[in-house]
Amino acid sequence: MQISTTLTDKVLIVNLVGEIDHHSAAKIKEKVERDYMTTNAKDIILDFSSVTFMDSSGIGMIMGRYKNLIPKGQLKIFGANEHINNIFSISGIEKIITICKDKDEALGGRYVR
């Protein structure tokens, strides 16, 4: 798993490449928490466009970031493939976290689902 972050207008954009499993979920959590705390970010956007696999550890990582943001900011996700979108649907994540089709939509604040 490769993890990189950029800050754009108080939004921490987290670019993820590879598979999200137990080990990588912990690394993502640490990186996101560290970068969020050391910047003036308000919101977090997770870029899933290069994520090829995610298990239940990914759900826990996402929910943990979501809980840490409330009530300060929002968590959004974009770029997930069909398989991962199905996981979001089955787990109910899509009911509480904004799932966007692309980065522009995530930054624009429109809600897709």
Image: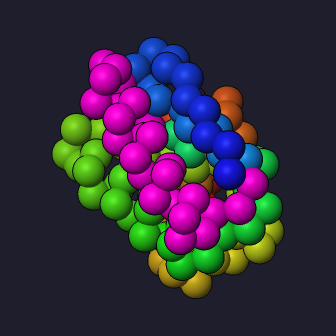
Q: Nearer the viewer, residue 85 or 32?
A: 32
Q: Is residue 61 left or right of residue 20?
A: left
> Which coloring applies here?
rainbow
Residue at the image position 68 percent from the left and 51 percent from the top = 1
Residue 74 place in picture, x, y as percent: 37, 43
Q: Is residue 15 left or right of residue 67?
A: right
> Residue farthest to the top?
9
Residue at the image position 40 percent from the left and 30 percent from the top = 35
Residue 106 place in picture, x, y as percent: 58, 37
Q: Is residue 30 magenta?
A: yes
Residue 101 place in picture, x, y as percent: 71, 48
Where, quadrant-wise, is the C terminus in this rendering? bottom right
Q: Is residue 62 visible?
A: no
> Residue farthest to the left?
71
Q: Give the residues in magenta.
A: 18-44
Residue 107 place in picture, x, y as percent: 56, 30
Residue 86 appears in which quarter of the rendering?
Answer: bottom right
Residue at the image position 66 percent from the left and 69 percent from the top = 54
Q: Main secondary structure of the magenta part?
A: helix
Q: Nearer the viewer, residue 8 or 20?
A: 20
> Residue farthest to the front?
23
How many labels, in total?
0
* Image vertical order of residue 70 relative to residue 113, above or below: above
Q: Nearer the viewer, residue 113 or 69?
A: 69
Residue at the image position 31 percent from the left and 23 percent from the top = 38
Q: Is residue 2 visible?
A: yes
Q: Is residue 38 magenta?
A: yes
Residue 104 appears in which quarter of the rendering?
Answer: top right
